[in-house]
Amino acid sequence: MEESTGSGSERKIGIVAGKFVASDGIAFSDFLRNKEPPRSLSQCTGDDAVEFLRRLPSDKIETVAISLGAADFNGDHKANPFRSSAVTTFLKERVKEKARGVKMN
């Protein structure tokens, strides 16, 4: 099963071994489509993924990052922005902030 981005792009987000929550992929696709200027999955970056994660409730960030990180983007797991160093750094910083007791979104 695949989710189309709906942006005119042929790029798709694929479900991998049931780890992917379809609503997360749809929400990310909507986020990209509503950016100024709109982006397709093939144009998105790790920074886009971090921006998307920052908009989520703090108790959902890690779950969504893992879920979307497990997805294949157009059959290429290397193209997945949720596996980027930007997302990894963002998640590590969140762990450090939690350990220091810093309140997050």
Image (tube, helix red, strand yellow):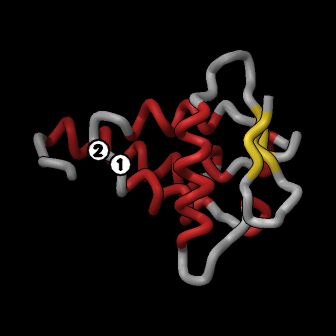
Name the amino acid type tagged 2: Pro
User: Residue 62 location, x and y as percent?
Assistant: 42, 35
User: Residue 99 location, x and y as percent?
Assistant: 19, 36
User: Residue 39 location, x and y as percent?
Assistant: 67, 71
Name the residue beneath numbered marker 1: 56
Dot 1: element? loop
Q: CB under 8 Å between callouts 1 and 2?
A: yes
Q: Is 15 situated left or right of 94 in this image?
A: right
The residue depicted at 64 percent of the width and 44 percent of the height is 83
Name the amino acid type tagged 1: Leu
Label 1 to label 2: alpha-carbon separation: 4 Å
Dot 2: element? loop
The residue depicted at 72 percent of the width and 54 percent of the height is 5
The residue depicted at 78 percent of the width and 51 percent of the height is 79
From the viewer's side, name the closer residue of 27 and 64: 27
The residue depicted at 52 percent of the width and 46 percent of the height is 88
Label annotation for residue 14: none
Q: Is 74 situated left or right of 88 in this image?
A: right
Name the residue beneath numbered marker 2: 57
User: For mark 2, does the 10 Å Cα neighbourhood hold few (<14), some (14 to 19), or many (20 or more) residues?
Assistant: few
